[in-house]
Image (spheres, grey):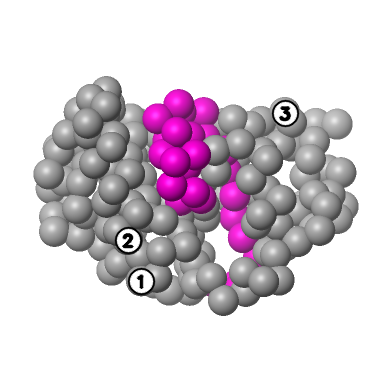
Amino acid sequence: MIRDASDPDAVKAAVGRLRDGEVVAVPTDTVYGVAVDAFQPGAVERLFVAKDRPKGLAVPVLIASTDDLAHLVEGDVDVFARRLVDRFWPGGLTIVLPRKSELAGLDLGGDAATIGVRCPDHRLVRELCRLVGPLATTSANRHREPTPPDAAGVAEALGAGVDLVLDGGICEGDPSTVVSVFGDEVTILREGRIPVAALLAR
């Protein structure tokens, strides 16, 4: 089902479906993504199935604001990671950080000791995160296939794997840049929207 993302009733429907553990495709500031409530039992598994995504590839979470980091990340955010947050959030940067120990059982795929987090530069998605909580979100495509730039393409690509598609117009371009930060050790995992040179500039 495709609904207009500017329709308040469609947004309410998306919130309800997310809270029920269903998969919702959303426009973002990078590409279309598929999202689930990260804490809803079975929801992340549905996300992996919808994309045919291997469980070894972790799914990052989107958050409403930097305040949400405290609920996901172990201890204080390191100085360099905090600098990246201050410079590039909201925006196209996913930061992999040590996961809060009590969230080790949260199955996002990949390494249970870490968590990839991004605050998107997209009002609708941040509002969904505010209403539902952190959303496990990844690109709205089958694994290793291109991400469609529009809602109709997303609905066709994912079929019954997605319960609702919010149509926000054309979303195309580079996905987020992904870095891991542990103390002073910074690893570029994927270059995308944010150039590496900009990340490393002191």
Disc nearer the start of the sequence (1/3): 1
The reply to whether the C-beta atoms of the residues labelled 2 and 1 are less than 8 Å apart is yes
User: What amino acid is at disc 1?
Assistant: Gly
Residue 134 shown in magenta: yes
Boundaries of the magenta span: 110-135
Callout 1 crowding tier (Cα within 10 Å): few <14, some 14–19, many ≥20: some
The reply to whether the C-beta atoms of the residues labelled 3 and 2 are less than 8 Å apart is no
User: What amino acid is at disc 3?
Assistant: Arg
User: What amino acid is at disc 2?
Assistant: Gly
111 left or right, relative to 174: right
Report x, y in % for residue 125: 42, 35
The residue mark sitting in front, 3 or 2, is 2
Is residue 174 something that shows in the picture? no
Residue at left 57%, top 76%?
A: 105
Report x, y in % for residue 79: 86, 44
Is residue 89 something that shows in the picture? yes
The residue lying toward the viewer, choosing from 119 and 17, is 17
Q: Which residue is mark 3?
A: 87
